[in-house]
Amino acid sequence: GIQVEQSPPDLILQEGANSTLRCNFSDSVNNLQWFHQNPWGQLINLFYIPSGTKQNGRLSATTVATERYSLLYISSSQTTDSGVYFCAGSTGANSKLTFGKGITLSVRP
Amino acid sequence: DADVTQTPRNRITKTGKRIMLECSQTKGHDRMYWYRQDPGLGLRLIYYSFDVKDINKGEISDGYSVSRQAQAKFSLSLESAIPNQTALYFCATSDFGGQPQHFGDGTRLSIL
């Protein structure tokens, strides 16, 4: 199966700062998703983005499928952005996602 | 996501007990999944089902079994629980291939 690497593993920001989270894949994926796990453990789907760029409020994501990576941008970070960010992808016709180990983000007030 | 409901939310039990975790969804999705999350390891797929008659093993199916009782219900069983099955378990759903997966709030399972 594919390998998913996320970087950096941990990130500490001051409220209001911007950040970029990276996800690299060992093979081409046709299904790429970003998730946020809040401090209460809930997993929220942020983006389904196999290619191109999408934006949702202060968050945006870009996937360059040919180079096998995706970036999640957080602008004007808030304390509520804290938690763990996962990327996940799958190949072929199935939707079996392989997850990275996550990036732990702490936003300080 | 309130559309995907997992029960129970928390469970503490003893080694050797049989445990069933339940998942129900109101999203009308055909595909359902069970994942396990361990600290520092991300999520790993246990079983997945593309419809009621299609059930498949995931990355870590040993020690687990599933039942897809209806389109909306997908249960995970631990026939004889062991301590290294202590983890956070998630159910997820999606529409046909390539669509976003939506997760329940998780079941925190502790096996003593």
Image (cartoon, grey):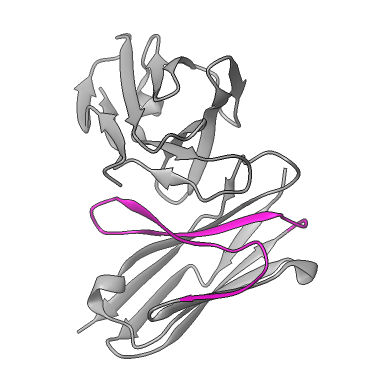
Quarter of the image where one finds residue A15: bottom left
Residue A30 is a magenta residue: yes
Q: Residue at x 23, y 53 (%)?
A: A40
Residue A62 image position (x, y, % from top left): 60, 75
Question: Relative to B70, does residue B91 appear above or below in the rendering?
Answer: below
Q: Residue at x 34, y 27 (%)?
A: B23
Quarter of the image where one finds residue A107: bottom left
Residue B57 image position (x, y, % from top left): 60, 23
Looking at the figure, which quarter contains the C terminus of chain B?
top left
| Residue sitting nearer the eye, B80 or A83 | A83
Residue A27 image position (x, y, % from top left): 77, 56
| Residue sitting nearer the eye, B78 or B49 | B49
Judge left or right: residue A107 versus residue B47: left
Q: Residue at x 49, y 32 (%)?
A: B33
Residue A63 image position (x, y, % from top left): 65, 71
Question: Relative to A39, does residue A80 appear above or below in the rendering?
Answer: below
| Residue sitting nearer the eye, B20 or B99 | B99
Residue A24 is a magenta residue: no
Question: Relative to B72, does residue A46 appear above or below in the rendering?
Answer: below
How many marks overall? 0
Highlighted range, magenta: A26-55
Which residue ends up furthest to the front in the rendered image? B28
